[in-house]
Amino acid sequence: MTPNESLRLDALRFPLIVLVVFIHAYEASVRFSGSVVGAAEIDSGFDSLRVLISQCIARVAVPLFFLIAGYLFAWQDSFSWNRFFEKLRSRVRTLFIPFVFWNLLALALLLVVQTGAYFKGFDSGAQVRVSELGPGDLFLWFFGVTKAPFAYQFWFIRDLMVLVLIFPVIRLLLGSSVVGWIAIACLGIIWGGYVFETALPTIEALFFFSLGVFVRIRGATLFDLDRFGWVFLVFFLALLVPDMLIGGAPQKHVLHRLTVLLGVASFLFVTSIHSLNGFWVRMRTLSASAFFVFAAHEPLLTVVRKIYYKLVGPGAPHEVFLGYLFCPAFVILILVAIHRISKSAFPRALNIVVGAR
């Protein structure tokens, strides 16, 4: 990978994490103990904007992250067990250790909320009480086997760890010139057509990670389609409106998957637009805090949203929409600031919990 390609991928990290945070801020209500607070009715205009951002544009982020992860994990030369285990050891530091740390923290916070009288009102009551779980159930929940992990956003890291472990199988299937094309085509059809879903890893994770591996082992790059970039971008922007009108990701429509696919190509392409160089320079500066924002934005976002709804008590559509914009933006700004302070005050500890990023 050339230095320019590395810089372009690095520039995408922070904007993609911002989109992930907005996916998690989509709901128009919050649940307290025994009650739900939110708008009595949703204005179609404001709701359409939320759908456009969180359920259409932002849905490009996770597939693109898996694509990049597969591309970076693979290599063009023939498969080597030594090289595989070397990469596997590095993923213990970058994936497994952060996964364990942030889930332990989320588990501790959940216990405090469920057992502490002061926080009782903030407990939605939707989660099973941790104190009632046996060791086996606790273990399965912790590692996201039976449901999303305690830090639910870490389902992405969970899937990535599984994909890394089964990489030799993926590499074997994709390494064949004929079988590789057939395998990628089948995965794409299954994902794009909602043929069936898988739990661990998700079909989306498997397809895009495999696609990244497929591109890398054939000596291509993620930016080889830049020459068609404007075409992808125009079609992506054009499809956003019908995708929004349909309802985006929750509606499980083939049009949405096509929009996501075009969005992946478009997001990669826009990093090459020279008029945006100043923006991408700033994004590369912020990329160091991207994983920290990803790891720590929940449950902080949920807490901030509950405080906002408690104080403002939004009932009007515009109040819901303002909360939708303000809460994730506030969380992101706070976490970027905390990351910068921690980088100066506790560099070694920070380095461990963010996987040496």
Image (cartoon, helix red, strand yellow):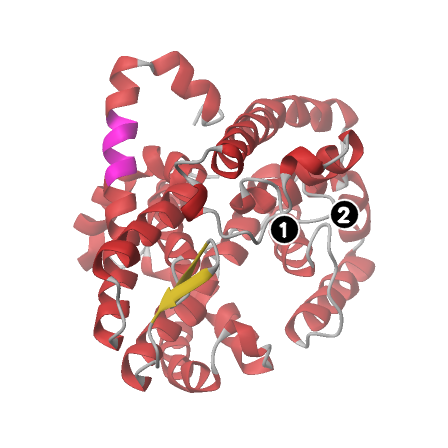
Which picture quadrant has residue 238?
bottom left
Residue 49: quarter of image: bottom left
Point out residue 28 in the picture as x, y percentages from the top left corner.
38, 68
Q: Is residue 112 above or below residue 25?
A: above
Q: Which residues are magenta?
A: 334-340
Q: Amino acid at mark 1?
A: Phe
Q: Is residue 174 left or right of residue 296?
A: right
Q: Position of residue 156 (x, y in %)?
A: 58, 46
Most distant residue in the front direction: 117
* Element carrying mark 1: helix
| Residue found at x 41% / y 76% | 236
Q: Could you tell me which secondary element the residue under label 2 belongs to?
A: helix
Q: Residue 263 location in percent, x, y? A: 44, 68
Q: Is residue 71 visible?
A: no
Horizontal side of residue 13 vs 285, given as left or right: right
Q: Earlier in the sequence, mark 1 or mark 2?
A: 2
- Hey, which quadrant is residue 29 in on the image? bottom left
Task: In the rendered structure, find residue 209 and report the number of the disc placed on it.
Answer: 1
Q: Residue at x 72, y 24 (%)?
A: 85
Label 1 with label 2: CB-CB less than 8 Å: yes
Name the one closer to the observer, 299 or 53: 299
The residue tagged 2 is: 170
Tell me if residue 80 can be seen.
yes
Relative to the observer, which residue lies in front, 148 or 274?
148
Q: Position of residue 19 (x, y in %)?
A: 38, 56
The three-letter amino acid code for the residue at tag 2 is Ile
Which residue is at a point 44% across and 70% down the rendered structure image? Answer: 55
336 is within the stretch colored magenta: yes
